[in-house]
């Protein structure tokens, strides 16, 4: 099934077990929380690399990464779901002449994403503003990083896509306040509040008041990496995260995920 509402591509466990010479790669040290259309977390066993052959496109086999997910009543009939991590790169590669040879499902998916991108560009790529949800004034000490719960405001009506947390031009925070760039899954089901990691690089405290604009969510796209590239990234991230021990830390799971994401996104700084 071709699904423009899914940011990842999946294959069910039963279908995967019928595939030969396709190793299952673990994601033990990678933070990847995926939610289904109902907002429930989607479990997975790991990921595989496979070649996707599309009828009508000769000599254009696509290297793809797919998550292996548990069997359900739904995927027993639909074992493979092709998400935007495959659709978007393919849309860029396929010319108009080649599209005429594709099944209507592919051309409809391309058209849907094109309309979606046009709408997003009209909003300069901004999907939502993030405002402080704390009714009590927050103090960020000098040279410290804290996690701030933020309200998701002015949501852009859009189906599932990738979004990145970044500084906003509408924020009045000074330039020495840095927002940790974190990629999240954006959609109708997005929580009303999400944590944002903020670092104060100055020598004096900074104050954030209730509903003050802290950051924004910007639309972003995913890309497919080769097995070697994906393996190198996983090995590097695993080795890097092994240097930190959070087992004795008194933080919530959301805060832990934010901190791990922040460290991985700033691996060059903390290595």
Image: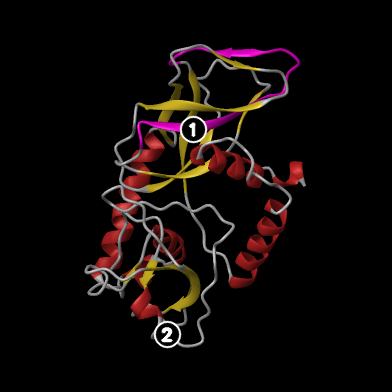
Q: Which residue is mark 2?
A: 19
Q: Is residue 148 above or below residue 267?
A: above
Nearest to the observer: residue 233 or residue 141: 141
Which of the labelled discs sits on residue 222, or is there none?
none
Q: Is residue 110 left or right of residue 169?
A: left
Residue 207, magenta (yes or no): yes
User: Where residue 12 appears, x then y in whole percent?
Assistant: 35, 72
SS at mark 2 in the image:
loop
- The magenta-colored residue range is 191-211
For disc 1, the neighbor class at 10 Å (few under 14, some 14 to 19, many from 20) is some
User: Where residue 200 appears, x then y in whole percent?
Assistant: 67, 22
Residue at horizontal 53%, vertical 52%?
31
Residue 4, quarter of the rendered image? bottom left
Residue at horizontal 45%, vertical 67%?
45
Q: Is residue 209 left or right of residue 120?
A: right
Q: Is residue 265 above or below residue 70?
A: above
Q: Which residue is mark 1?
A: 195
List the single residue furthest toward the front: 248
Residue 191 visible to the viewer: yes
Residue 57 visible to the viewer: no
Q: Is residue 248 above or below residue 88?
A: above
Residue 8, magenta (yes or no): no
State the CA–CA distance, disc 2 to disc 1: 40 Å
Upstream in sequence: badge 2 or badge 1: 2
User: Where residue 102 appears, x then y in whole percent?
Assistant: 30, 73
For disc 2, the neighbor class at 10 Å (few under 14, some 14 to 19, many from 20) is few
Which quarter of the rendered picture does the N terminus lie within?
Answer: bottom left
Number of labels in the image equals: 2
Residue at horizontal 38%, vertical 39%?
120
């Amino acid at each position: 099934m071709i699904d423009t509402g899914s940011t990842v591509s999946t294959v069910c466990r039963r279908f995967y077990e019928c595939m030969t010479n396709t190793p299952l790669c673990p994601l033990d040290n990678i933070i990847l929380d995926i939610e289904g259309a109902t907002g429930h977390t989607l479990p997975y066993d790991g990921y595989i690399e496979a070649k996707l052959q599309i009828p009508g496109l000769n000599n254009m086999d696509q290297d793809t990464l797919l998550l292996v997910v548990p069997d359900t009543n739904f995927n027993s009939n639909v074992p493979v779901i092709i998400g935007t991590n495959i659709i978007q790169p393919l849309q860029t590669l396929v010319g108009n002449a080649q599209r005429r040879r594709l099944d209507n499902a592919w051309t409809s998916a391309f058209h849907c994403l094109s309309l979606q991108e046009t709408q997003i560009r009209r909003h300069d790529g901004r999907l939502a503003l993030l405002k402080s949800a704390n009714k009590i004034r927050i103090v960020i000490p000098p040279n410290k990083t804290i996690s701030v719960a933020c309200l998701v405001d002015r949501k852009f009506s859009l189906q599932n896509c990738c979004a990145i947390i970044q500084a906003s031009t509408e924020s009045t925070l000074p330039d020495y306040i840095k927002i940790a760039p974190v990629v999240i899954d954006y959609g109708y089901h997005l929580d009303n509040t999400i944590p944002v990691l903020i670092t104060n690089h100055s020598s004096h405290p900074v104050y954030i008041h209730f509903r003050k604009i802290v950051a924004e969510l910007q639309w972003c796209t995913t890309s497919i990496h080769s097995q070697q590239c994906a393996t190198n990234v996983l090995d590097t991230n695993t080795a890097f995260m092994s240097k930190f021990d959070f087992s004795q830390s008194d933080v919530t799971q959301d805060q832990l995920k934010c901190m791990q994401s922040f460290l991985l996104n700033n691996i060059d700084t903390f290595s």
